Image: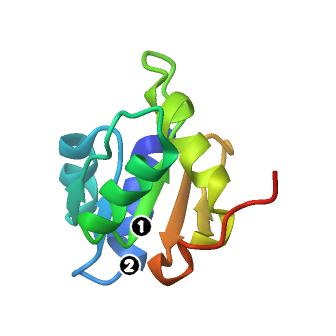
Amino acid sequence: MSYYEAADWVGKETPPASIIACRSTYLFYLRAHRKTVGYVFSEKPDEVLKSLTDQHATYVVVDHFMWTGTTGHYLVPAIQTRPAMFQPVHQTADKETWVLAIHPDTAGSAAPR
């Protein structure tokens, strides 16, 4: 499962103090051994982004779970409104799960509409 592959990568390649925002926090923590936090399920992108910054998340996982559409419905639209805030740092072999570094200091630069 690519979610586990991403968690394994995070556990090996990120600083121990990293905070990972993801959909399934318990599963991710068990593999990555990093603090994990969820994100707000809101259709308002600014609320989702605020939940990431308020929790001091340093990375976010963009998964492709088939059993839930929350990532695509809430997280991806928020990321798309502030692309400069996120830097891809890892993509799983199947290209279905991404790990993005979060740069909150660029949160104010909105995507062109």
Query: As rendered, which of 69 and 2 lies closer to the eye?
Result: 69
Q: Is residue 112 left or right of residue 103?
A: right
Q: Determine contact: label 2, label 1, CB under 8 Å.
A: yes
Res 14 label: 2
Q: Is residue 88 left or right of residue 21?
A: right
Report the amino acid beneath label 2: Thr
72 relative to 106, above or below = above
99 relative to 27, above or below = below
For mark 2, give the secondary structure.
loop
Query: As rendered, which of 26 and 38 lies closer to the eye?
Result: 38
Residue 73 percent location from the top left of the image: 53, 28
| Residue found at x 47% / y 32% | 43
Q: Which residue is mark 1?
A: 59
Report the amino acid beneath label 1: Tyr
For mark 1, give the secondary structure.
strand
Query: As rendered, which of 86 and 31 lies closer to the eye?
Result: 86
| Residue found at x 49% / y 83% | 105
